[in-house]
């Protein structure tokens, strides 16, 4: 009986143990089912679910280890109390065995309950920590959202500023592509084609061949409403020419345009009236950038229209005004004097000072000298009684000296018309400038700096006792015929004077040919002389003498010859003295 009861108790304990195990598995499944939704919720709320699961697993593995000590003490207390109660109800012979089995059963039951409680605690701790982490994550998410929102606000503000800047920057290309320029009207002029062309013909000669600046290739055009005139100015800084002519000026204005282009356009315009219109196109790109200005001149006639781009008149070099008392000279005196010496001026830029005409002005006369080292031309004209206006008083002891550039002399001789009665000379020693004014033309230039050679002192050591009179026309014609046999290496021509035959023999001999001509000459009967000159220099000197005959003064074959006018002259009323000196090439053998 006792064994059967014990077997039943053991069987009952086993069933109880199995029931407890099943209950434990059920609770585990429930706990697992309870944890799983929490983890899934955590996954949906935050992308950092993996970190949370790692944290939970860490807590599950770590917490039981720490809690086992507490569980041991709890089980020991519980088993002691249970053993004491069972000892009171069970007999003493089976007490130890029953106590041992029950203790194991109770221990297992209590252990399972303890594990369940701990798991609940772990789950609660885990859920608490998970909740805390989720809260942290939520706060972190919130802070991240806040930061992201702040960044987005900052970015939106920055992007707004950038967009605004880009909009402001994008305005300039639009304005450049679709500008709205402001048009300012300038001059409005109606003028005659002939007057315009003549004025341009005068001033365009001052244009430099190779301008150092684009403005020097332009002509300054000024329309004056008060005087109803157009003023044209061209300069190369050393030479300035200004020409004016009458026109119908409706609106004043000024502009500079390429002079050569304008000259060619006006030259081919038909006779009649020409209209000039200038305008300035102003384009403002941005407030920070400066405005751009485009200057243009419109030219229209009966056949068509033209437009020339120009440069602002403010960039044109200022013209120097010579404020002195003018000296009035007859045009014919000044012009003929310049022409008579211009041929002897040197064209070699290395001989700077002799590339111009030396001028000496006194109270009684005007002396002009030109030389290139091989020939000398000296012309003196009287200035007494030629001034109609009060002019600069020059005493006999005082002399005005300056050297005009050869280019200026050529322009004066070419442009000074015969219809001009007088020319005014303005001399300014301080600025080294000379001004010449006639009619509506003003020419100003700078002197050549340096000491001009004293040619008269050099020629004073030679004597010219022998005289030969030759007709100019036959002499020039004979020289031109023989000039075809000259070349660059040999340009000499022999002159053989024969007093017994009263003739002059001109001969030239080269490897490829020779020539011999004889002309009539008036010379001393005992005179026999052979001399050689440069053919080119002799022709130019003969042509520069404004008379029907030429008187030649000679001494010997190695001395220079002097040529002076003889016979009729075109302006006999003008008191003029001309002397032209030629140096011989070399002394002939015979």
Image (tube, grey):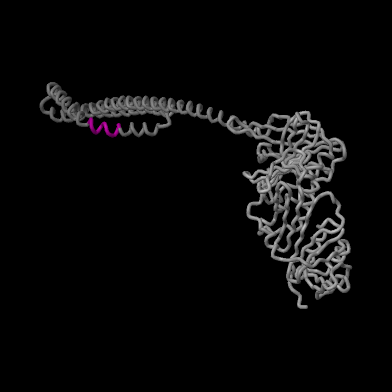
Q: Is residue 345 left or right of residue 166?
A: right
Q: Is residue 216 visible to the viewer in this orientation of the structure?
A: no
Expressed as whole percent of the image width and height from the top left, the position of residue 157 reads 50, 26
Q: Mostly what secondary structure, the magenta segment?
A: helix
Which residue is painted at 71% across and 66% down in the image? Answer: 462
Indicate the quadrant containing the C terminus: top left, top right, bottom left or bottom right: bottom right
Tell me which corner region of the image, top left, top right, bottom left or bottom right, holds residue 428: top right
Which residue is painted at 36% across and 31% down in the image? Answer: 52
Find the magenta span and give its range: 59-67
Q: Is residue 18 visible to the viewer in this orientation of the structure?
A: yes
Residue 338 magenta-drawn?
A: no
Indicate the quadrant containing the N terminus: top left, top right, bottom left or bottom right: top left
Task: From this view, report whether residue 578 is shown above or below residue 421.
Answer: below
Task: From this view, report whether residue 478 is shown above or below residue 352.
Answer: below
Q: Is residue 394 left or right of residue 247?
A: left
Which of 82 and 260 lies nearest the eye of the viewer? 260
Tell me which corner region of the image, top left, top right, bottom left or bottom right, holds residue 489: bottom right
Which of 356 and 282 lies nearest the eye of the viewer? 356
Expressed as whole percent of the image width and height from the top left, the position of residue 436 reads 73, 43
Furthest residue in direction left, as rendered: 92
Task: From this view, report whether residue 158 is shown above or below residue 590.
Answer: above
Which of 18 and 67 lies nearest the eye of the viewer? 67
Task: From this view, report whether residue 334 is shown above or below residue 121.
Answer: below
């Amino acid at each position: 009986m006792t064994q059967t009861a014990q077997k039943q108790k053991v069987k009952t304990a086993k069933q109880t143990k199995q029931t407890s195990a099943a209950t434990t598995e059920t609770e585990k499944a429930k706990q697992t089912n309870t944890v799983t939704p929490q983890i899934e919720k955590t996954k949906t709320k935050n992308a950092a679910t993996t970190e949370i699961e790692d944290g939970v697993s860490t807590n599950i593995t770590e917490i039981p280890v720490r809690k086992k000590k507490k569980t041991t003490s709890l089980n020991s207390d519980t088993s002691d109390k249970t053993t004491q109660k069972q000892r009171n109800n069970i007999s003493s012979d089976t007490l130890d065995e029953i106590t041992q089995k029950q203790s194991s059963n109770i221990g297992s039951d209590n252990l399972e309950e303890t594990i369940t409680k701990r798991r609940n605690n772990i789950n609660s701790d885990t859920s608490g920590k998970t909740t805390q982490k989720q809260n942290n994550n939520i706060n972190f998410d919130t802070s991240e959202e806040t930061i992201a929102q702040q960044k987005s606000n900052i970015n939106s503000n920055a992007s707004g500023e950038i967009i605004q800047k880009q909009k402001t920057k994008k305005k300039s290309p639009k304005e450049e592509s679709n500008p709205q320029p402001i048009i300012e009207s300038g001059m409005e002029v109606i003028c005659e084609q002939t007057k315009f062309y003549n004025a341009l013909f005068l001033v365009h000669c001052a244009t430099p061949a190779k301008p150092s600046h684009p403005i020097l290739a332009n002509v300054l055009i000024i329309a004056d409403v008060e005087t109803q005139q157009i003023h044209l100015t061209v300069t190369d800084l050393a030479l300035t020419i200004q020409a004016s002519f009458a026109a119908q000026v409706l609106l004043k204005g000024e502009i500079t345009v390429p002079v050569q282009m304008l000259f060619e356009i006006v030259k081919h315009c038909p006779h009649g009236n020409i209209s000039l219109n200038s305008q300035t196109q102003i384009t403002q790109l941005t407030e920070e950038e400066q405005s751009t200005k485009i200057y243009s001149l419109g030219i229209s006639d009966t056949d068509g229209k033209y437009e020339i781009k120009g440069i602002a008149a403010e960039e044109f070099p200022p013209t120097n005004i010579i404020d002195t008392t003018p000296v009035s000279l007859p045009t014919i005196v000044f012009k003929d004097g310049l022409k008579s010496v211009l041929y002897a001026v040197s064209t070699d830029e290395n001989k700077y000072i002799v590339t111009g005409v030396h001028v000496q002005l006194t109270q009684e006369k005007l002396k002009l000298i030109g030389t290139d080292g091989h020939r000398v031309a000296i012309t003196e004209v009287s200035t007494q009684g030629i001034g109609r206006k009060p002019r600069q008083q020059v005493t006999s002891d005082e002399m005005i000296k300056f050297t005009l550039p050869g280019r200026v002399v050529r322009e004066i001789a070419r442009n000074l018309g015969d219809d001009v009665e007088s020319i005014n000379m303005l001399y300014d020693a301080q600025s080294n400038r000379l001004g010449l004014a006639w009619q509506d033309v003003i020419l100003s230039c700078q002197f050549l700096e340096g000491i001009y050679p004293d040619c008269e002192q050099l020629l004073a050591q030679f004597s010219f006792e022998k005289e030969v009179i030759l007709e100019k026309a036959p002499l020039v014609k004979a020289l031109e015929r023989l000039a075809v046999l000259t070349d660059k290496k040999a340009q000499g021509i022999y002159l053989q004077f024969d007093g017994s035959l009263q003739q002059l023999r001109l001969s030239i001999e080269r490897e490829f040919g020779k020539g011999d001509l004889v002309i009539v000459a008036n010379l001393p009967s005992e005179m026999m002389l052979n001399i050689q000159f440069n053919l080119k220099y002799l022709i130019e000197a003969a042509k520069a003498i404004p008379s029907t005959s030429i008187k030649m003064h000679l001494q010997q074959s190695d001395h220079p010859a002097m040529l002076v006018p003889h016979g009729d002259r075109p302006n006999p009323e003008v008191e003029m003295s001309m002397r032209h000196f030629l140096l011989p090439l070399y002394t002939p053998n015979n």
